Image (spheres, grey):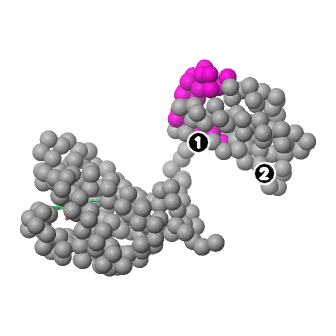
């Protein structure tokens, strides 16, 4: 992906027209398959200064794909009157310096941290071991297993990277599922028991947290099932995934 910045200087008397033209131009821009996202911002300290940021799938996709498409023709028709107001129009490559700020708590913090995930997995595996469908899979489980899974979940949801540092990371987790031949009924039971345990130990039950939590469980258990099949050839090395709030951020009050 590549980020294009277009800086405009637009006199105050053209501001409304300019923004209206961009609102129309945004329709074909947003429909272009080469466009990942876009945003037009106006400077608060200098209201004549605008920056349009467009994230493209690649520089080449922008220059040879979009520029030769009917989306470009429709886009350009709207913004043509402002082309001579452009002060800079260049592509920028992202660097490794990027990240989220502290304004939104992680799912890990929201859940109550390591202690909450340890309570969760302790209650969960107590029931798992008694369960007729999934219990046999865990008959020889390591006594530390509940804590290891709590460590994994903590890392996934934004807590410390202890599973990576102390337990072998993604590769180790994967190796524990290989060849287990997990069935769909077992996967469903596993998810059901984990959600029961979440209620039992009082994990937050607000819609946003539970939606994100269940989203991860659906994703993770479907991968665990697929990777556990005898004919599976999963990726062997990968980072531990990081799961966020998705489309419904936490409700932090009005
Ligand atoms: C989001 C979904 C899942 C996560 C995050 C997860 C996580 C883990 C982790 C981290 C380990 C390795 C623990 C360690 O030794 O370090 C593990 C092992 C294991 N998992 Fe999963 N798992 C998931 C889904 C499932 C499902 C659906 C099943 C079966 C129904 C399953 C069955 C097992 C078994 C049998 C082991 C080996 C236990 C032992 O003998 O020590 N897992 N899992």
Say which of marks 1 and 2 sits in front.
Answer: 1
Magenta stretch: includes residue 131: no
Q: Quadrant of residue 139?
A: bottom left
Residue 95, percent from left and from top: 54, 47
Q: Residue at x 30, y 65 (%)?
A: 152
- Point out the tag, 1 or 2, that comes first from the N-terminus: 1
Where residue 43 is drawn, which disc sits there? 2
Q: Quadrant of residue 200?
A: bottom left
Magenta stretch: includes residue 70: yes
Question: Crowdedness of circle 2 by 10 Å Cα count: few (<14), some, many (20+)?
Answer: few
Q: Residue at x 18, y 74 (%)?
A: 127
Judged by its main secondary structure, the magenta piece is: helix
The answer to whether one can see residue 63 in this image is: no
Residue 120, percent from left and from top: 30, 75
**Does 61 sit above or below residue 206?**
above
Identify the residue position indicated by label 1 in the image: 37
Where residue 174 is drawn, which disc sits there? none
Q: Quadrant of residue 187?
A: bottom left
Q: Residue at x 17, y 70 (%)?
A: 128
- Quarter of the figure with the C terminus: bottom right
Q: Secondary structure at mark 1?
A: strand
Q: Residue furthest right?
A: 13
Distance from the alpha carbon under mark 1 to that under mark 2: 20 Å
- Relative to residue 97, is residue 177 drawn left or right? left
Residue 11, percent from left and from top: 88, 41
The answer to whether one can see residue 51 in this image is: yes
Closer to the camera in the image, 240 or 14: 14
Residue range highlighted in magenta: 53-73
- Relative to residue 33, is residue 123 drawn left or right? left
């Amino acid at each position: 992906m590549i980020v294009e910045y277009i800086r405009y200087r637009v006199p105050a008397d053209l501001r409304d027209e300019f923004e209206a033209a961009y609102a129309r131009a945004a329709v074909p821009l947003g429909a272009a398959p080469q466009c990942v996202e876009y945003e037009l911002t106006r400077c608060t300290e200098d209201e004549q200064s605008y920056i349009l940021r467009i994230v493209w799938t690649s520089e080449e996709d922008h220059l040879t794909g979009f520029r030769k498409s009917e989306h470009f023709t429709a886009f350009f028709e709207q913004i043509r009157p402002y082309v001579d107001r452009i002060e800079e129009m260049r592509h920028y490559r992202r660097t490794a310096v990027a990240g989220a700020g502290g304004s939104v708590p992680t799912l890990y913090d929201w859940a109550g941290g390591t202690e909450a995930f340890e309570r969760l997995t302790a209650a969960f595996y107590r029931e798992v071991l008694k369960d007729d469908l999934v219990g046999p899979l865990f008959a020889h489980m390591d006594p530390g297993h509940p804590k290891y899974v709590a460590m994994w979940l903590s890392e996934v949801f934004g807590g410390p990277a202890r599973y990576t540092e102390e337990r072998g990371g993604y590769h180790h987790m994967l190796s524990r599922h290989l060849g287990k031949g997990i069935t769909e009924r077992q996967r469903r039971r596993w998810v059901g028991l984990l959600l029961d345990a979440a209620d039992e130990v009082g994990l937050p039950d607000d819609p946003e947290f539970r939606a994100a939590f269940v989203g991860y469980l659906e994703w993770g258990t479907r991968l665990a099932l697929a990777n556990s099949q005898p004919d599976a050839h999963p990726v062997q090395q990968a980072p531990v995934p990081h799961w966020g709030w998705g489309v419904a951020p936490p409700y932090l009050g009005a």
